[in-house]
Image (tube, grey):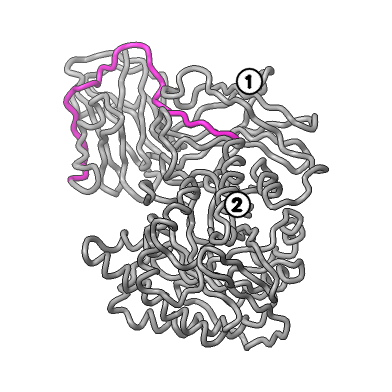
Amino acid sequence: PRPTRTRRIAAPLTAGLLAAGALSLPAQQAHAAGSVVRVTGSQGDWQLTVDGSPYQVKGLTWGPAVADAERYMPDVRSMGVNTLRTWGTDASSKALFDSAAAHGIKVVAGFWLQPGGGPGSGGCVNYLTDTAYKNQMLDEFPKWVQTYKDHPGVLMWNVGNESVLGLQNCYGGDELERQRNAYTTFVNDITKKIHGIDPNHPVTSTDAWVGAWPYYKRNAPDLDLYAVNAYDAVCDVRSAWEQGGYTKPYIVTESGPPGEWEVPDDANGVPEEPTDRAKAEGYTKAWDCVTGHRGVALGATLFHYGTEYDFGGIWFNLLPAGQKRLSYYAVKRAYGADTSRDNTPPVISALSVEGDAAKVQAGRDLTLSVRASDPDGDALSYEVLENSMYVDQSKQLTPRPHTDLGGGRLRVTAPDRPGVWKIYVKVTDGRGNVGVETRSVRVVPPSVDGTNLALGRPATASSYQTGGGDCPCTAAGAVDGRNDTRWASDWSDPQWLRVDLGTRSTFRHVQLVWETSYAKAYTIQTSDDGQTWRTVRQVTDGNGGVDDFDVSGTGRYVRVEGTARGTGWGYSLYEFGVYN
């Protein structure tokens, strides 16, 4: 049950810092108030205890900056949460532990190991031969354990995150098996060292799939319990545990609605994001499956108490930009907190793109139809945003001005760059709650009346890229009528591409479809002999995407000459259309 699509949730900043070893160790702090945490009971009838009392992990993964801990901790506590999970432990963790403890919350304190982060991970380590890295971690992690072992905010230690799966990005075949065995053996080495310093807190290790557990079973006998990140697959964990013949309990350290790698693609070929209501149901289902495995699953830290307001934030965060969603209240209900007096979010019951969502013309009007209501009768306000994740890997959400046409219809200008975009509609109630839905649209160059005189005609250029990526990218790629082939020039100014129309012809429109490497300044010129050129259009403020303009020109040859590149690369044109 391994994810088939690259996971695109980046590791938190602290994880990156830990991986880089860019941390200094503080003076040791003495705390007398640390808890004694135990895994007690016997096969299939375990429980976690804190100072002798049963403890079920009702948790969330922690997203905000440590500096904001005190700002958010009362809210976390109000949700019925008793546990937070982090991915890295360092000098900055003290403020988080302090704030958590002050509000009766404990922390599953993480330690980051490369490659980390599952299928999308980076930073390969050879766990058979890289003794320097291993010794560094064997030295560093126990120092933090020594620093914080008596802190009342600590619940347990968690060594690594998704590396057993992530090693598939570094190795294959028999070598991958050897590395996975070596990694889990190393996790056990760290576990023994932690136990030697701190006998009062359990040690676990997280991976992205239950397929990691056989390696832990074989190589990490000193772990007190296992841990797994499982989203849509969380309800399969129980049967995997039962069939695997395991003799240790587990916690779920990330879960929630299906991830990008678990959902079917939509009509435009990109992952179909679940609705707000489906996401809320995902958290409820996850918690039901965890609590359903009584005596074995000791709780969960669901993903994610985060405020990031971007592609991944809208997919998973309970409160993007600090505004609470249906999922936030689903978790609060699951953890038994009182929601009877809560004002709850707007519910979007329908969102559609008018017309053909697979042929949205670049830069033209795009109309969305949205149906939303508020359970509390609050007045609603709307915002439209766009994201280019599937065009250029950007996670940013960019607000788009919109016109409210009434009846739930919102008109915006479509993005200017061809490709598949995500369009988001955000509905807020003025009470700190939000509903968000998203649809994909495939942006295409606008259709032009008339005949494209340049289509399939002979074309030449000042230069072209001969290799790399999708190249060779000759001049012909810009006049073949296809938006997946291109002309790409050398990385210098000026550069030109010209097309021979065959006979002296009159044209009235030009359309340029730029790839990422566009022209900031360029001219459109004509010639009867290919020697003497007349300028019919000059552009000094180009921004890429699709350039569409009416011109009046006559000549046998038409060329575009770039004089200032918009990027550090060359000029790159998908299509150069000349219309009569």
Separation of marks 2 and 1 at Cα, in angstroms: 28 Å
Residue 325 place in picture, x, y as percent: 67, 42
CB-based contact (under 8 Å), mark 2 and mark 1: no
Q: Is residue 321 visible?
A: no
Q: Nearer the viewer, residue 521 or 12?
A: 12
Task: Name which residue lies at 57% across and 23% down.
Answer: 368
At x 27% / y 41%, what residue is drawn? 495
At 61% from the left and 45% from the top, the residue drawn is 284
> From the viewer's perspective, is 184 left or right of 412?
left
- The answer to which of marks 2 and 1 sits earlier in the sequence is 2
Mark 1 highlights which residue?
409
Looking at the rendering, the stretch of residues picked out in magenta corresponds to 437-466
Q: Is residue 49 magenta?
A: no
- In this image, 178 relative to 110: left or right? left
Label 2 element class = loop
Q: Is residue 527 visible?
A: yes
Q: Is residue 528 above or below residue 256?
A: above
Type of amino acid under label 1: Arg
Residue hosting label 2: 308
Residue in the foreground of this view, choosing between 314 and 422: 314
In the image, is 125 to the left or to the right of 289? left
Above/below status of 569 relative to 344: below
Mark 1 residue element: strand
What type is the residue that disc 2 sits on? Glu
Q: Is residue 531 left or right of residue 198?
A: left
Locate the C terminus and report the quarter of the image it occupies.
Answer: top left
Within 10 Å of the Cα at label 1, are there few (<14), some (14-19), or many (20+) other Cα atoms? Answer: some
